[in-house]
Amino acid sequence: MANSSIQQAADALHEARSTRIPVSRISETFGVESLHDAYRVAAINTNRAIDAGRRICGKKVGLTSVAVQRQLGVDQPDFGVLFTDMEFVSDADIPVSRLIQPKAEGEVAFVIGRDLTEELSWGEFLLGIEYALPAIEIVDSAIENWSITLVDTVADNASCGLYVLGTDPKRISDLDLATCQMRFLKTDELVSEGHGAACLGHPLLAAWWLAQTMQQVGDPLRAGDVVLSGALGPMFPVREGDALQLEVAGLGKVSCIAA
């Protein structure tokens, strides 16, 4: 695909993010058809963010929940880049006003304990996970009405927005992440339920997919990286003033106020 079309698609997404005005599918407007080209679009805006002084602190796996895949009409995971200015800690007020059309998901987050730069066995990968935490991800899309294809969300940095981490880290050996139940309340109303197996069968399998994928693209996970492993249940819209509280059995709670 022509570099000019890739650049134009990246510019359109950057402008949408800057103005908080969504755009039509870049897959159609600019003819971005392949995942390879979609990741090229995303990389342009990642580099633009780094040049502006933002710092990468991890990665996310997107579209791991069958429920979310059905909501969006896609059938495989993707990955995006997390920046430090996206991160908040439980009980924070989070600035959803800087997003375009935010929605919330309940997830398991992992903190990487060592550089995962070599080809990994499953055992080596498990030794590389230092902690697990409950996490709220506020996803966002620059595409009008969330009418995305896989290519569109990949190009849009896997629809990254903001995320909130719990404050009580756990060792993965102390958890049953496949069967853990997730309950998500919005202003005291239950709005989403799920369990660990909804995330690619197991949240660790989602993180394993990410570790392998990042090695393949030459950008391996590093010590201290945060990994958002993917949704445990359906996402839902968030508006200013909403009080969000997530509980993942065994991991604990995490909460925030949408400001």
Image (cartoon, rainbow, N blue to C red):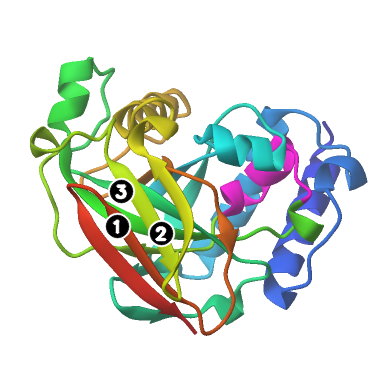
Give the magenta-colored segment's residue range. 147-159
Find out whether residue 54 is within the magenta segment. Answer: no
- Residue at label 1? 247
- Residue at label 2? 184
Gap in Å between the C-alphas at discs 2 and 1?
6 Å
Residue 101 in the image: state x and y as whole percent: 67, 67
Badges 2 and 1: C-beta atoms under 8 Å apart? yes
Camera-side residue of 166 and 209: 166
Name which residue type carries label 1: Glu
How many numbered discs?
3
Q: Main secondary structure of the magenta part?
A: helix
Residue at 68% from the left image edge and 30% from the top image edge:
35
- Mark 2 or mark 3: which is in front? 2
Checking the image for residue 109, the label placed there is: 3
Residue 53 in the image: state x and y as whole percent: 46, 70
**Residue at the far top in the pictured view:** 121
Name which residue type carries label 3: Ala
Q: Earlier in the sequence, mark 2 or mark 1?
A: 2
Residue 257 in the image: state x and y as whole percent: 42, 80
Checking the image for residue 148, the label placed there is: none
Find out whether residue 157 is within the magenta segment. Answer: yes
